[in-house]
Amino acid sequence: MPALETARQELAETYNLAPNPQLAADLADLYTRMDRVVTPADWAMHAPYVDAINKLKKEKNAVILAHNYMTPDIYHGVADVVGDSLQLAIEATKVKEDIIVQCGVHFMAETSKILNPAKTVLIPDMKAGCSLAESITADGIAQMRAKYPGAPVVSYVNTTAEVKAASDICCTSSNAAAIVRAMDSHTVIMTPDQYLAQNVAAEVPEKNVVWWEGSCIVHEQYTAQDIHDFREWNPGTRIIAHPECPPSVVEASDFSGSTSGIIKYVTEQKPEKAMLVTECSMASNIADALPEVDFVGPCNMCPYMKKITLEKILWSLHTLTEEVKVDPDVAEKARIAVERMIDLSRELGI
């Protein structure tokens, strides 16, 4: 993307992007999906971008895949498919459109390109990285294999294509325990999230789970003391943690699950009050569907996910820039690890 002011000037010359209360009213069906967390004034500013993006998608034959951590204006306003890492990976294999716009972080766009190499894959901001994915390289995988000869490497999907290519199989937070349990070896290497690995180790005690010491900058910030303090200040609140949190946090919570698992739990249980110990936008994106649930803080934002904005999505589609490419040899090896995950998940009924 060029200098922000240059891009904005070009977009303004092509599209009417001024705040538009009338257009906001015309798009009321979209607004009702987010009116609990987005103010009318903000929607009047978002509506011109949403309208332009949705029209441009049809013109360019594009589809938008958006992670659950996207802001509500993206998640409810322009996304065609939403979900966690596993859901988006599966959906990427089904895309018929020519262009995939990945609203998430870079490794997710790489995964879509790996699974559907004939498609053009765009990410609205190339700098939307991931601290967890950047914590390990293929050399790190080689180090773990040397330390634990013969042990299979299960790498979190939150990794680069290079790391996936060096691994035996991938996993997500929703299927990690099942995949580790299904490995033939007693010792299983998990990379790169140490906390997910430790939580899986507790869930699958029959395996010797060893791990790489990486972590997510969002989830590692939570502590068990935070949970205990919040319970004291807000009695009766259901506390729900993501398994990328430290084990002490998971143990102190009422439920722990993947992004999709958290949504399923809250939808089925409908607690009066709930605190999601994960990225902030999760609660915002399910709040309107569950008006009976009072979602309360605290929460931590992912600075990488928040690099994706309506303005950048529009620019990427307008110019067809910010294309993600993966070396074909790396992609072929990485595809094997990801497809093994998808196939095994289906076999296990996950």
Image: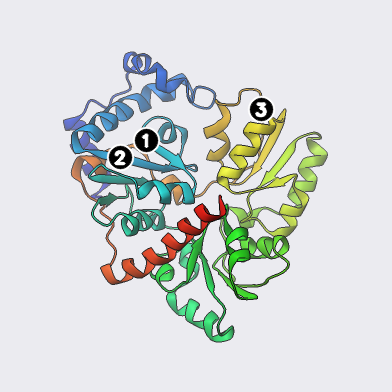
Q: Earlier in the sequence, mark 2 or mark 3?
A: 2
How many C-alpha atoms fall within 10 Å of the one at disc 3: few (<14), some, or many (≥20)?
A: some
Q: Position of residue 89 (x, y in %)?
A: 42, 51
Query: Identity of the amino acid at label 3?
Result: Val
Q: Position of residue 336 (x, y in %)?
A: 39, 66
SS at circle 3:
loop
Query: Identity of the amino acid at label 1?
Result: Asp
Q: Earlier in the sequence, mark 2 or mark 1?
A: 2
Which image quadrant for residue 78?
A: top left
Residue under pointer 1: 80
- Of residues 91 and 159, the one nearer the viewer is 91
Pointers 2 and 1 in contact (CB under 8 A)?
Answer: yes
SS at circle 2:
strand
Residue extending furthest front?
347
Query: Which residue is located at x 26 percent, y 67 percent?
Result: 328
Residue under pointer 3: 293
> In the figure, is residue 186 to the left or right of 77?
right
Q: Position of residue 154 (x, y in %)?
A: 53, 68
Q: Position of residue 160 (x, y in %)?
A: 41, 65
Q: Earlier in the sequence, mark 1 or mark 3?
A: 1
Residue under pointer 2: 63
Query: Which residue is located at x 25 percent, y 42 percent?
Result: 97
Query: Identity of the amino acid at label 2?
Result: Val
How many C-alpha atoms fall within 10 Å of the one at disc 2: few (<14), some, or many (≥20)?
A: many
In the rendered view, tell whether residue 343 sits above or below residue 189: above
Q: CA distance from mark 1 to mark 3?
A: 25 Å
